[in-house]
């Protein structure tokens, strides 16, 4: 998602700085400016953030699953908190955070709680922000949930399961990228939340 978003921004003439590890610098799209730093230590990258810029937080555990509770805390939440400190220091104009739907679930509640804690940290810092809340993003190497689409369609029309099934609808990578671009190009004062149904309209 990150490289695709960077390419979209560069194609529109934006200046893009991307936080990367030293060994990942070569993976960045050409013309993106690498910021080699520790994503868990705000001091290592806060001075590289341009004042009044848009900060986009995408870092997280790949392939989230129920057994990754401690990784959600040590990677997703820890990096979000560091980013909040850095963004606040740089007086960014807007903070864009890819969160997750907050409809209660048992299977992924640890992930949801960590992302909710990330949202809380952004709010407590007084940052203007957009929270984008997908459930599962369909894209390269992430197509397997499509096999369950017929089941979800049935659950959506059963009164007792309809509301929750609709709240956990899948979104596509292109929809997420368009939602991110919308958030970046339309900053708000305060906090805006983009839920699944709105993501699916992009």
Image (cartoon, rainbow, N blue to C red):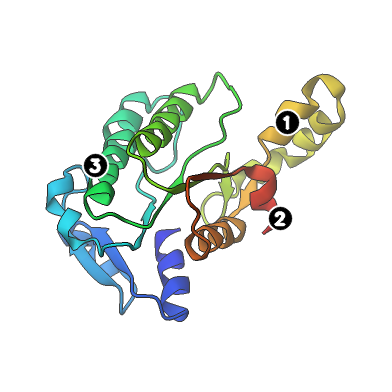
Q: Which residue is mark 3?
A: 82
Left or right of residue 39: residue 164: right
> Earlier along the polypeptide chain: callout 2 or callout 3?
3
Question: For this view, does 93 lie left or right of residue 178?
Answer: left
**Mark 3: which secondary structure?**
helix
**Image depth: mark 2 or mark 1 in front:** 2
Q: Nearer the viewer, mark 1 or mark 3?
A: 3
Percent coordinates x, y for residue 91 in the rendering: 28, 54
Q: From what the image shows, is residue 32 above or below residue 94?
A: below
User: Mark 1 vs mark 3: which is more N-terminal?
Assistant: 3
The local crowd at label 2, few if under 14, some if 14 to 19, many if 20 or more residues have their Cα within 10 Å, is: few
Where's residue 11, x and y in %? 46, 80
User: Is tag 2's residue or tag 1's residue first in the polypeptide sequence?
Assistant: 1
Residue at 51% of width from left, 53% of height from top? 141
Give the residue number, with chain letter if any, for mark 1: 165
Depicted 151 relative to depicted 2: above or below: above
Circle number at residue 201: 2
Quadrant (top left, top right, bottom left, bottom right) of the N terminus: bottom left
Q: CA distance from mark 2 to mark 3?
A: 32 Å
Q: Is residue 151 above or below residue 41?
A: above
Task: Classify 10 Å Cα crowding around label 3: few (below 14), some (14-19), many (20 and above).
Answer: many
Foreground of the two, 18 or 108? 18
Task: Report, in whole angstroms, how far the alpha carbon at label 2 lies from the one at label 1.
Answer: 17 Å
**What is the CA distance from the residue labelled 1 to the residue labelled 3?**
34 Å
Q: Residues within 10 Å of mark 1 (few under 14, many from 20)?
A: some
Residue closest to the far front: 189
| Furthest residue toward left | 43
Which quarter of the rendered picture does the C terminus lie within?
bottom right
Would residue 167 appear left or right of 106 to someone viewing this image? right
Q: Nearer the viewer, residue 84 or 147?
A: 84
**x and y, in percent, of residue 14 in the image:** 39, 76
């Amino acid at each position: 998602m990150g490289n695709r978003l960077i390419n979209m921004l560069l194609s529109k003439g934006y200046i893009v700085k991307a936080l990367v590890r030293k060994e990942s610098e070569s993976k960045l799209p050409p013309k993106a400016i690498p910021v080699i730093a520790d994503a868990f230590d705000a001091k290592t990258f806060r001075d590289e953030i341009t004042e009044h810029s848009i900060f986009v937080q995408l870092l997280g555990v790949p392939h989230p699953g129920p057994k990754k509770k401690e990784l959600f805390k040590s990677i997703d939440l820890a990096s979000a908190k560091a980013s909040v400190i850095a963004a606040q220091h740089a007086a960014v104009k807007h903070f864009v955070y890819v969160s997750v739907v907050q409809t209660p679930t048992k299977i992924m509640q640890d992930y949801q709680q960590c992302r909710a804690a990330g949202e809380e940290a952004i709010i407590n810092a007084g940052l203007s922000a957009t929270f984008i809340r997908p459930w599962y993003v369909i894209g390269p190497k992430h197509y397997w949930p499509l096999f369950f689409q017929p089941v979800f369609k049935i659950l959506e029309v059963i009164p007792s399961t309809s509301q929750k099934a609709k709240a956990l609808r899948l979104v596509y990578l292109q929809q997420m990228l368009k939602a991110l671009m919308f958030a970046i190009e339309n900053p708000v004062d305060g906090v805006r939340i983009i839920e699944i149904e709105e993501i699916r309209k992009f």
